[in-house]
């Protein structure tokens, strides 16, 4: 993502100065991708998370690209939309709607083509303990060194680096033996502040697939009904749901966050993310090659939408009634693209406590308050390494902590952390978003923030210190 945004500035400046009419489509697409990124993130950061627009520019957007730090933006508090313009020529709008957060509109659009009637939530009782309410963390588990635990959590907020290498940690939440034992928040953030997922959203898309499998509406071993693949001789029609969940579909997809890459165009320019991803041709035989691809998650999200009824309202109701409401994840907001399909790869917001609820669901084998939400065996399936991935660091839409095959270096985003047990698995996202699930230790650890240099959000020290504090 940072490489894309940094390159964006250089290319746009060169192209604008050059002024060639033949290069205008490239100029336009590049600029619209950049302004789309800025508009979407300012809108969500402000109207969903409650951050000031200038704070979003300073912490989440500016550090990623100097050119975007100088874009012009306008926030309409009454209409709840954000307009971003680059060089006074290229503009994009993102607009907020109740229940579904911010929608990045297609270039030239002023309002979304769909609406959702949000479900009215009942706030958990303040004094009830987590996860049934918003009560304070428990401090009564025998054997826990709470002073060491608090020190470990507080250390995740330290800023020992240069200003341009700020951690900007926003929330840390620790669950042990099913109880909330520690949490800490940055200024301006609290236990109900929804925070950005980036690719952690993939884990929630996977949970929805699991629910549909449990309900008998989808089959892991079958080829899902992707409209673009239904031609009689289309080899993509043989791709199974399991292969999509394991990122081994064989489809071509450029996940590098560079100018003109598939993922950049999909998230910041294309109005139908899943439809765009579904146009990709096969590069390998299905099941023979592993390659991380956000487009896969958006095809799955579009599949979920069509499976549960077809409309954005249908999909919204399905998520709420089958996942968020049972878990009491009242702050969770999934955001759609301009076509009305939720961006299953990247755009979900939830509080630190609600991310912990979602992690705890997987720690409890998909059962919540005695009710099975995910199919029996789904969590084991999620954490089983994908065939043909020699790094052994990816399961079914979840990152794993298994050692790679002999002689291979760890994947930069999925390598093993020495402090963390091999059975740990996690949701992870850009700028240091993490939900670590540690079955051997009965722990869930959540970390959220705006950390463009993601190595500064390394979870190893935090998890190691938490494990020591709880005696595991």
Image: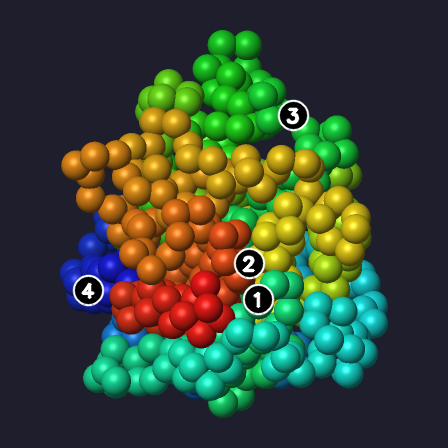
Q: Which residue is mark 3?
A: 219
Per the model, the C-alpha gap separating discs 1 and 2 is: 6 Å
Q: Quadrant of the N terminus?
A: bottom left
**Mark 4 vs mark 3: in front:** 3
Query: Is 125 on the left-hand or right-hand side of 431?
Result: right
Q: Residue, x 77% and y 83% (percent of image)?
A: 127
Q: Secondary structure at mark 4?
A: helix
Q: Residues within 10 Å of mark 4 (few under 14, many from 20)?
A: few
Whether pointer 4 and pointer 2 mark residues with C-beta atoms closer than 8 Å, the reply is: no
- In the rendered image, residue 81, in percent from the top left (x then y), is placed at 59, 74
**Mark 4 vs mark 1: in front:** 1
User: Quarter-wise, where is residue 78 in the image?
Assistant: bottom right
Q: Foreground residue, 247 or 275?
A: 247
Q: Secondary structure at mark 3?
A: loop
User: Quarter-wise, where is residue 95 in the image?
Assistant: bottom right
Q: Sequence order check: which comes first, mark 1 or mark 2?
A: 1
Q: Residues within 10 Å of mark 1 (few under 14, many from 20)?
A: many
Does residue 223 appear in the picture of this structure?
A: yes
Q: Residue, x 46% and y 68% (percent of image)?
A: 471
Q: Which residue is mark 2?
A: 442
Whether pointer 1 and pointer 2 mark residues with C-beta atoms closer than 8 Å, the reply is: yes
Per the model, the C-alpha gap separating discs 4 and 2 is: 48 Å
- In the rendered image, residue 298, in percent from the top left (x then y), is placed at 53, 43
Q: Sequence order check: which comes first, mark 4 or mark 2?
A: 4
Q: Secondary structure at mark 1?
A: strand
**Mark 1 vs mark 3: in front:** 1
Hey, which residue is sitting farthest front in the picture? 143
79 w.r.t. 100: above or below: below
Per the model, the C-alpha gap separating discs 4 and 1 is: 47 Å
Hey, which residue is sitting farthest top in the picture? 233
Q: Which residue is mark 1?
A: 176
**Which of the labelled discs sits on residue 10, or is there none?**
4
């Amino acid at each position: 993502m940072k490489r894309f945004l940094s390159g964006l500035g250089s290319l746009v400046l060169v192209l604008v100065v050059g002024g060639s009419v033949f290069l205008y489509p490239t100029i336009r697409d590049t600029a619209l991708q950049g302004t789309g990124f800025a508009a979407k993130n300012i809108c969500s950061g402000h109207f969903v998370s409650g951050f000031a627009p200038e704070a979003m520019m300073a912490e989440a957007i500016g550090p990623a690209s100097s050119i975007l730090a100088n874009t012009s933006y306008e926030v309409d508090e009454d209409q709840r939309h954000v307009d971003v313009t680059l060089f006074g020529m290229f503009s994009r709008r993102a607009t907020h709607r109740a229940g579904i957060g911010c929608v990045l509109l297609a270039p030239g659009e002023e309002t979304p083509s769909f609406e959702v009637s949000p479900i009215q939530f009942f706030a958990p009782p303040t004094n009830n303990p987590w996860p049934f309410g918003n009560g304070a963390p428990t401090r009564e588990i025998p054997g826990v060194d709470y002073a060491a635990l608090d020190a470990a959590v507080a250390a995740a907020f330290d800023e020992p680096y240069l200003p341009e290498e700020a951690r900007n940690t926003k929330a840390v939440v620790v669950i042990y033996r099913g109880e909330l034992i520690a949490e800490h928040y940055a200024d301006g953030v609290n236990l109900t502040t929804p925070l950005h997922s980036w690719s952690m959203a993939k884990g929630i898309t996977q949970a929805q697939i699991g629910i549909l499998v449990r309900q008998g509406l989808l089959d892991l071993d079958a080829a899902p009904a992707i409209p673009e693949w239904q031609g009689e001789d289309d080899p993509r029609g043989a791709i199974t749901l399991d292969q999509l969940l394991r990122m081994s579909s064989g489809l071509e997809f450029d996940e590098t966050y560079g100018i003109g890459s598939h993922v950049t165009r999909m998230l910041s320019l294309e109005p139908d993310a899943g439809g765009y991803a579904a146009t990709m041709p096969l590069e390998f035989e299905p099941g023979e090659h592993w390659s991380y691809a956000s487009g896969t998650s958006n095809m799955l999200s579009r599949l979920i939408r069509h499976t549960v009824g077809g409309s954005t309202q249908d999909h919204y109701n399905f998520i709420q009634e089958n996942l968020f409401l049972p878990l009491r994840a009242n702050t969770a907001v999934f955001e759609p693209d301009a076509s009305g399909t939720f961006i299953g790869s990247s755009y979900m917001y939830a509080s630190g406590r609600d991310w912990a609820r979602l992690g705890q669901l997987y720690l409890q084998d998909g059962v919540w308050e005695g009710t099975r939400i995910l199919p029996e065996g789904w969590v084991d399936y999620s954490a089983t390494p994908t065939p043909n991935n020699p790094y052994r660091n990816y399961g079914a839409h979840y990152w794993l902590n298994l050692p790679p095959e002999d002689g291979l270096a760890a994947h930069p985003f999925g390598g093993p952390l020495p402090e963390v047990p091999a059975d740990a698995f996690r949701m992870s996202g850009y700028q240091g978003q993490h939900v670590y699930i540690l079955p051997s230790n009965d722990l869930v650890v959540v970390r959220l923030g705006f950390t463009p240099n993601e190595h500064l959000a390394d979870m190893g020290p935090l998890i190691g210190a938490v494990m020591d504090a709880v005696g595991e």
